[in-house]
Image (cartoon, coloured by chain):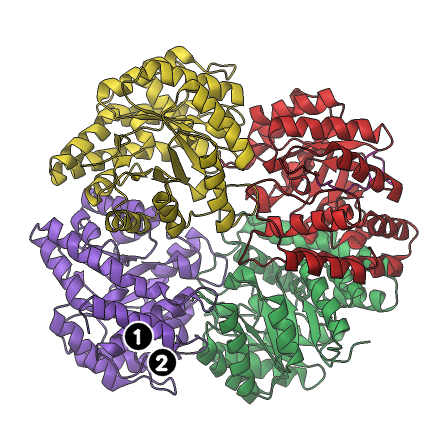
Chain colours: A purple, B green, C yellow, D red
Amino acid sequence: MTATQFAGVIPPLCTPLHDDWTVDTASFRRHIDAQLTAGVHGIFVLGSSGEVPFLPDAHRRVVLETAVEQAAGRVPVLAGCIDMTTLRVLEHVRDAEKAGADAIVVTAPYYTRTHVAEIDRHFRLIKEQTELPIFAYDIPMAVHNRLDREMVLRLAADGVLAGLKDSSGDEAGFRFVLLRKAERGLDSFAVFTGSELMVDTALALGADGVVPGLANVDPDGYVAIHRHVRAGELAEAKRVQERLLNLFTITDIAPVTRMGRGSAALGAFKAAMKLRGFIDNAVMAPPQVPLNTEELLQIKEKLVEAGLV
Amino acid sequence: MTATQFAGVIPPLCTPLHDDWTVDTASFRRHIDAQLTAGVHGIFVLGSSGEVPFLPDAHRRVVLETAVEQAAGRVPVLAGCIDMTTLRVLEHVRDAEKAGADAIVVTAPYYTRTHVAEIDRHFRLIKEQTELPIFAYDIPMAVHNRLDREMVLRLAADGVLAGLKDSSGDEAGFRFVLLRKAERGLDSFAVFTGSELMVDTALALGADGVVPGLANVDPDGYVAIHRHVRAGELAEAKRVQERLLNLFTITDIAPVTRMGRGSAALGAFKAAMKLRGFIDNAVMAPPQVPLNTEELLQIKEKLVEAGLV
Amino acid sequence: MTATQFAGVIPPLCTPLHDDWTVDTASFRRHIDAQLTAGVHGIFVLGSSGEVPFLPDAHRRVVLETAVEQAAGRVPVLAGCIDMTTLRVLEHVRDAEKAGADAIVVTAPYYTRTHVAEIDRHFRLIKEQTELPIFAYDIPMAVHNRLDREMVLRLAADGVLAGLKDSSGDEAGFRFVLLRKAERGLDSFAVFTGSELMVDTALALGADGVVPGLANVDPDGYVAIHRHVRAGELAEAKRVQERLLNLFTITDIAPVTRMGRGSAALGAFKAAMKLRGFIDNAVMAPPQVPLNTEELLQIKEKLVEAGLV
Amino acid sequence: MTATQFAGVIPPLCTPLHDDWTVDTASFRRHIDAQLTAGVHGIFVLGSSGEVPFLPDAHRRVVLETAVEQAAGRVPVLAGCIDMTTLRVLEHVRDAEKAGADAIVVTAPYYTRTHVAEIDRHFRLIKEQTELPIFAYDIPMAVHNRLDREMVLRLAADGVLAGLKDSSGDEAGFRFVLLRKAERGLDSFAVFTGSELMVDTALALGADGVVPGLANVDPDGYVAIHRHVRAGELAEAKRVQERLLNLFTITDIAPVTRMGRGSAALGAFKAAMKLRGFIDNAVMAPPQVPLNTEELLQIKEKLVEAGLV
């Protein structure tokens, strides 16, 4: 049993766009409803899956407002406040507060060459300026910096951090966090994995929540894993997770010779979401390269194979 | 002889701040005047030395407006439009245009995992939206990505890029760009080095401009190097450059065990600028860690030794 | 049930040394017996835990001969044939054959900037020259290169590779390998994790074997995890694994300001092995820095706490 | 004026091989003579250009003996003693001593995760065991570790190091070493650049020697640069260097999609050496991938263009 309101399956929602790259709020509302219908326990907007680095502040505000309004208190809304350093992050925090988000998610500083003392100060300064619970977002792939484990735990003990979203891919490190959380009685500190592929394992190890990008395509799958693990049905959970591992290979269809790994994955998610009717338009924000017809066809085949369309 | 209006010594200006981290425009104007008095040929605002990743958009606008007003057409003003992706960069481009900047400086996308095809598209999309000359900013230390050399040259040939600011530290690669520029007759393509330490060499190899952060502390030194190289006095240029290499060691005084390399360097620059009377306050934006008394004393000693205070 | 003779707990044995850095064969034999008494299912010599990069070829031969003789057919002996490229590796393969090892373990080329086509060729050329089963050793921390997953699976399908030792720390990637192994009917392809910290999970996911360095200190713990997982007692396995996570923190006692992470870990292992009576001398090969008295005391305290001394 | 016997143009010789990958000593002798005829001031064998990571110890010994015999005291012979750690390096040092080499070249430890304290100890332990002058080889591309500048200078001051071969590509760092060498009166400490592309600049900045791989193809060019710089003819030196920059593009002909950057460069060097009649066979040691016919044709065209065949 988790002692935090932030727990369970909390998908990092993709942001549907129009051809002019403004937010397609109708699709976004429909997508949120599809997720809630599937039984997710929260939503995380303005993460990497949400194209947060691609969205101007005004677009981000639309995302926040739409998400909070559409969730309508049914589940908590976590808001990515993703920017390079403290003062810039604080402006996004203001927007999250205004929109009524339930928690914020903040990375280490990036672009600048930083230090653990500065990362620690970063989170403390933000805490001084907001009542919202703060999740530290460990995403070295984006910020080129790992969060120091002891720093995170110290910030949790000091009441600065309400949780951790770990997208580092370091499962052993994640396990240490869970172990120390238990030892130190940090019951209300919510520990999430950002992996799509180790959700059953993470939950079995004691993770409070999971934030799988692939839930944009198949929320039912992740809700099923969560339910199975909670019921002690680990073999069933593993079976669903393995199905989702195979589904995840849609992110490898567009080749590295043609585009970045970000666009290949996001383009696949959005194409699949469109095929499933969750959104109207699979367009990605610039300068991302779109998937081509052949790649889209392969994605469709994988979805058909998976029984999802 | 360079065929571009963007040439010579173009310091990347530090941004003086008040204790509340707003821009100290009085100090900034004084600093700009000190640079112009020393004879610099342009100024670059909102680069790494200008703490651009630390400044909210409103602060950035103040920097732009103050710089353009204070330069008053005496030298061109280049404006860093530093953000993660195209749409966000374009908002900074609008601000640079409104303020009356003479050119913009743009990095590859970051935070996201990108690709040369996307970086190419990034610059082309920005070019479609502005009349301002665009400098590509190659700064792998910040964006964790090198600009592809042939892409840069192709964008130059296609009229997308007006110049390159190379802060990659790869002098041999820089030399290839200069060689190809000459071969392909890209006369108006302005090639700058961002190094503080190889300015004499870069100019002797044919660089159009140099953008040394240390010029914030000693603009006369860099102007002297430029004059010497233009006069064919390479030994004198080397002598001044070697003095500046020694001065640059102020950036190593604060130890890596206490802060990031960014703060150590910027803190040293700002401390030295204050000691020289260019600015009133050496404070850095959060979450950067300030230098301590002992470190500041060592900086002062180095400046005294160099005859700068 | 695994279809391979290479399965279960297969510790990567440390190499006890004398003060003159020759191999302490008496200690080594005693250590091997301690491991076999604990019930391990194989031994892996001349891996990273065995200080393979530190040992001259003659020392390596002593290790091989002693291990094979002492194991005496009771368990299989896997031999690291660790060198930079094909021809050099083949000389170690000859030594492994002469000594009577049961399988060899080979990394991607290193020092040189290589390519998947060359890594593929590397394994195929080695296969042409030996009858011994070949394990690919995925250890990016050492060789600065990940093994391509599809290449590994193709080499398995082609009969080139008998197994994989995955020390990449990428649990999700590991899981993909296990999934594809099952799908493609590669029953005799033995998949090992090199992690100390995810052994219960890896076995539950279907790993054939585990190669935990910490088993040098506590072989009983890992044998217990293996037994529990095979018996479906996942909660018990998790409890033992968590105890071993805590024990593993002995590798963090020596600080990064004083020595490399390799020496800190290996020094801790050897100190603990000596405290437990497995070996006589905790000395490491040069240029590794020895642990100091205070660090050794802390290791002892952790062992006492763990009930191991 | 340099105070060291190790100075001038010192090519890192490629190692000609037979089809069975043994050393083609006849070609090797011819190649050495071609280099000496061109006027090089020393030769460096068993470096990266010499395929040292690919050669078994017996092959390395043949290289050493052949080189020393063929040089016959006309120029000094520097021998790469390239291996992972101290004891292994010392075995190569013994071989270099036996063969009669004039100096040895040693990298930081690799494969293992090391530390500046261990690298320092590494060089000191080797110094204790040999009378031969030791060059530190800074090659982060291969060993994934930069040599600490102050450590190198301290080892020079302590008489441990006789020189530095800097293949880091960090020209500014190189310049600091030259500056400190002068300041601290380390007159006999020989500082070499490993760059092919900044030879004129490095010599003008005060480098004692240059070790350009491309000299295998065009030794006359590098000897000419050296002569021009010594004569103060910097413009002429620059002109030759620019010709050699263009020639160096033979290393980019084989694409990254087909092979590693090492094979592409070495394959181009060897193909060009064969075309120029220096060696009989362009074969590379395994697992390197050979260049194809089309790539070889492009190399020939570049050589024709350069007037070298």
Around disc 2, counting alpha carbons within 10 Å, would you say few (fewer than 14), some (14 to 19), or many (20 or more)? many
Residue drawn at (29%, 85%), measured in percent from left and top? Answer: A24
- What's the residue type where badge 2 is placed? Val
Q: Could you tell me residue C159's position as x and y percent? A: 36, 40
Kindly identify which chain the residue marked by label 2 belongs to. Answer: A
Q: Is residue B196 visible?
A: no
Horizontally, residue A193 falls left or right of residue D136, namely left
Q: Residues within 10 Å of mark 1 (few under 14, many from 20)?
A: many
Image height of B281 relative to C211, above or below:
below
Residue at x 73%, y 41% (from the top left corner): D12
Figure check: D95 above or below B228? above
Residue B280 higher or lower than A202, as above or below = below
Q: Pointer 2 and pointer 1: residues touching (CB < 8 Å)?
A: yes
Which residue is disc 1 drawn over? A270
What residue did someone put label 2 on?
A283
Residue closest to the eye, C31 or C177? C177
**Picture coordinates of residue C280 (x, y %)?**
38, 13
Write down the quadrant of residue A303 in the picture.
Answer: bottom left
- Looking at the image, residue C188 sits to the left or right of residue C260; the answer is left
Quadrant, the C terminus of chain C? top left
Q: Is residue B22 visible?
A: yes
Q: Residue furthest top?
A: C26
Q: CA distance from mark 2 to mark 1?
A: 8 Å
Return the x and y of residue B105 as percentages of the image width and height. Answer: 59, 75
